[in-house]
Image (tube, rainbow, N blue to C red):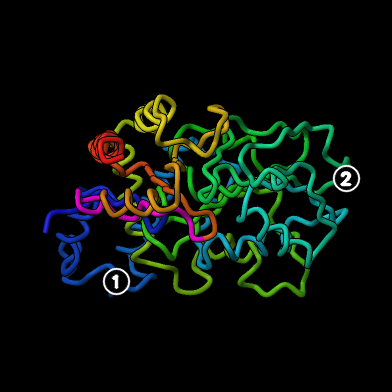
């Protein structure tokens, strides 16, 4: 069977070249006679894998030397707890921007550990836009300000990094990290699950500034203390070795593609193909009206009815496309077009939209 175009929001599609290399190295990684999955995490070969992965990530993002890169377990969900447990250092206050389900979950978890204030929110409008935010909204003594850069469920994305002045800025970048250049120095902490743009589920990357490490209360379990992980080089316990290996291949792939400026150009081109059609169609409609708030990673749209939505998803499956059904609580249609989605996949989707619209109008 030929490969389908997989529009899943995560775990997401991977580059064929990365999958091919992983397949070639599955039984015998570079002459070791074993798979990376069988390799000791303390071995010289694996140390080289994780060190090379970190170096390439640092190169891609131009991560300053005063930041640690951690390869952790637990997904982005564990970071909902780790962030407040480590960064509520002084006032025990933090300000959150609420833009969707993932920020809501982070807020709920953080409230267990400190005084958490929602300083901006689009919940009243069903998260159909990025809320207005200004540094004046932030409490002077807030230990940090938190936001989710891209929202997979509703299809919104921050086009610019929020200005928080001298405050520590924390971002969950799980679904748009490595999709465009960012200035890491604007952030105190960035984290991201790997299964969108960096590899496979089971790995979380944390990028944290040195001066924010070491403030967890002594009662915090060591597995939730960034300092312990930093001191142990992400090897307090056995790391997700194969996941780190795949992430390393992804970092190499991005460098070969030309880096983040090239990825940004490709991602903007892919997103524009869909949004341009949505904006001129009188059958399909984007769920996010303001172009400046639209996600380049997760394009959400609808037909005139839930029945047509369902029929269109079935139609795309006959044409070699999968996972276009919208999130279970939102409905509609969602095309997740992360870095590894080839432009041919997007062109195939738009052609299906054109054909389905014409077919539907003909039958009415």
- Disc 1 to disc 2, how far (Cα)? 46 Å
Q: Which residues are magenta?
A: 316-328
Alpha-carbon neighbours of circle 1 within 10 Å: few (<14), some, or many (≥20)?
A: some
| Residue drawn at 85 percent across, 54 percent down | 90
Q: Residue furthest front?
A: 364
* Rendered residue at 72%/72% (across/down): 220
Return the residue at label 2. 141
Nearer to me, 196 or 2: 2
**Element type at marker 2?**
loop
Relative to 43, is 186 above or below?
A: above
Q: Is residue 322 magenta?
A: yes
Q: Quadrant of the N terminus?
A: bottom left
- The one nearer the camera, 34 or 179, is 179
Front tag of 1 and 2? 2
Q: Position of residue 244 (x, y in %)?
A: 38, 60
User: At 33% across and 39% down in the image, what residue appears?
Assistant: 254
Residue where numbered disc 1 is placed: 37
Residue 158 can be seen, yes or no: yes
Q: Quadrant of residue 121?
A: top right
């Amino acid at each position: 069977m030929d490969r389908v175009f997989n529009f899943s929001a995560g775990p997401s599609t991977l580059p064929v070249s990365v999958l091919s290399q992983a397949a070639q190295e599955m039984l015998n990684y570079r002459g070791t006679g074993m798979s990376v999955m069988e390799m000791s995490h303390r071995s010289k070969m694996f140390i080289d894998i994780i060190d090379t992965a970190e170096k390439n990530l640092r190169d891609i993002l131009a991560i300053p030397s005063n930041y640690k890169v951690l390869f952790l377990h637990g997904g982005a969900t564990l970071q909902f707890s780790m962030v407040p447990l480590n960064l509520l250092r002084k006032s025990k206050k933090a300000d959150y921007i609420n833009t969707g389900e993932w920020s809501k979950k982070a807020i709920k978890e953080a409230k267990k550990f400190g005084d958490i204030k929602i300083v901006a929110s689009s919940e009243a409008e069903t998260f159909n836009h990025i809320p207005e935010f200004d540094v004046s909204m932030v409490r002077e003594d807030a230990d940090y300000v938190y936001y989710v850069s891209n929202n997979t469920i509703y299809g919104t994305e921050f086009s610019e990094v929020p200005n928080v002045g001298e405050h520590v800025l924390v971002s969950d970048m799980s679904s748009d990290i490595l999709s465009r250049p960012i200035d890491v120095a604007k952030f105190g902490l960035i984290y991201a699950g790997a299964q969108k743009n960096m590899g496979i589920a089971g790995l979380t990357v944390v990028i944290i500034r040195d001066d924010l490490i070491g403030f967890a209360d002594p009662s915090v379990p060591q597995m939730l203390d960034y300092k312990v992980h930093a001191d142990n080089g992400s090897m307090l316990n056995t790391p997700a070795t194969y996941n780190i290996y795949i992430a390393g291949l992804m970092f190499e792939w991005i460098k070969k593609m030309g880096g983040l400026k090239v990825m940004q150009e490709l991602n903007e081109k892919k997103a524009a193909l869909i949004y341009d059609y949505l904006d001129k169609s009188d059958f399909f409609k984007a769920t996010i009206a303001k172009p400046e708030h639209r996600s380049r990673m997760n394009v959400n749209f609808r037909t005139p009815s839930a029945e047509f939505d369902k029929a269109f998803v079935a139609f795309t499956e006959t044409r070699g496309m999968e996972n276009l059904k919208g999130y279970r609580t939102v409905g509609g249609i969602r095309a997740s077009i992360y870095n590894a989605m080839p432009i041919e996949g997007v062109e195939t989707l738009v052609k299906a939209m054109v054909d389905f619209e014409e077919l539907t109008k003909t039958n009415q």
